[in-house]
């Protein structure tokens, strides 16, 4: 089973505390500082579309892409009541192709952790090709430190209808963290069990900066944990911004 196939229906309930408004406020602050005024936005690796919907409500013209059909189904249902909903497309980031260039490409949370460095380079090249001149590309990742610190951890998420157990193991040789996910969810009077395995790659700031530069991006900045501080040794989430000249 692919990552998020089983979790798609339960994802929003289990990630209720993700601060999407704060993430949008942070990026709009960076856009303002760079004197960027995007209209057409691509939400890359959009998942269930929570950020896509937020962007649409802010007045952006939104296209949203993800590789999971199940996640996009949830996203489309969530956006159905909007007067100008996002256009959802089924595409992996390393094969991204848009009918029209975007002014801003944004990816929230761990989208680029889910692909190895080779595929990151392919995705960066596709993002560069999919931006209009002067366009901006922003994304964030879980840091190397954060993923290594997860080694051997077990944690639980639960609601009245969902019980989820995550078990993690960090492979130092391959620089990746594997998540075994046992998902139990209620169907009427019975509970059903599904299992998924997720793999996230630990990318260093330096190698992603180099990959962005190789793809053609300039004015590359990195930030720490929703602040404008530079990343430190124990930054949990690294934010990147880069421009197409």
Image (cartoon, rainbow, N blue to C red):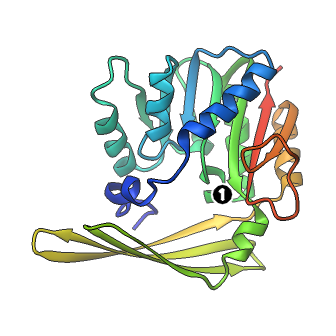
What residue sits 66% from the left and 76% below the top? Answer: 150
| Occupied quadrant, residue 37 | top right
| Occupied quadrant, residue 48 | top left
Q: From the viewer's perspective, is 240 left or right of 167?
A: right
Task: Please state the horizontal and vertical placement of residue 13, each as a whole percent of the image.
Answer: 37, 57
The relative height of residue 20 versus residue 100 in the rendered view (above or below) is: below
Q: From the viewer's perspective, is 139 left or right of 44?
A: right
Q: In the rendered image, which residue does mark 1 sit on?
A: 113
Quadrant showing the C terminus: top right
Residue furthest toward the bottom? 152
What residue sits 71% from the left and 49% below the top? Answer: 120
> Dot 1: few (<14), some (14–19), or many (≥20) neighbours within 10 Å?
many
Task: Please state the horizontal and vertical placement of residue 132, each as a whole percent of the image.
Answer: 69, 17
The relative height of residue 123 versus residue 188 in the rendered view (above or below) is: above
The relative height of residue 221 versus residue 143 in the rendered view (above or below) is: above
Q: Secondary structure at mark 1?
A: helix
Quadrant showing the N terminus: bottom left
What residue sits 56% from the left and 29% below the top? Answer: 42
Task: Please state the horizontal and vertical placement of residue 52, each as a whole percent of the image.
Answer: 48, 33
Residue furthest toward the left? 189
Q: From the viewer's perspective, is 54 left or right of 24?
A: left
What residue sits 72% from the left and 76% below the top? Answer: 149
The relative height of residue 188 versus residue 238 in the rendered view (above or below) is: below
């Amino acid at each position: 089973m692919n990552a998020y196939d089983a979790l798609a229906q339960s994802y929003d309930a289990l990630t209720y505390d993700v601060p999407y408004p704060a993430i949008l406020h942070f990026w709009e602050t960076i856009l303002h500082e760079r004197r960027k005024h995007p209209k057409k936005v691509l939400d890359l690796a959009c998942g269930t579309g929570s950020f896509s919907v937020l962007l649409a409500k802010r007045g952006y013209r939104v296209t949203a892409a993800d590789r999971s059909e199940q996640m996009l189904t949830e996203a489309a249902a969530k956006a159905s009541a909007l007067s100008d909903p996002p256009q959802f497309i089924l595409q992996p980031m390393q094969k991204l192709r848009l009918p029209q260039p975007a002014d801003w490409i944004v990816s929230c949370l761990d989208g680029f952790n889910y692909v190895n460095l080779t595929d990151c380079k392919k995705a960066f090249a596709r993002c560069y090709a999919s931006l209009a001149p002067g366009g901006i590309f922003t994304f964030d990742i879980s840091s190397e430190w954060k993923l290594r610190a997860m080694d051997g951890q077990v944690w639980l998420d639960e609601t009245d209808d969902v019980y989820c157990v995550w078990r993690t193991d960090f492979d130092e040789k391959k620089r990746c963290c594997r998540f075994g996910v046992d998902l139990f969810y209620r169907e009427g009077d019975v509970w059903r069990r599904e299992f998924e395995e997720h793999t996230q790659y630990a990318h260093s700031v330096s190698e992603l900066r180099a990959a962005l530069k190789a793809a053609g991006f300039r004015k590359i900045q990195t930030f720490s944990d929703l602040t404008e501080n530079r990343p430190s040794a124990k930054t949990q989430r690294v934010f990147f911004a880069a421009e197409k000249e």
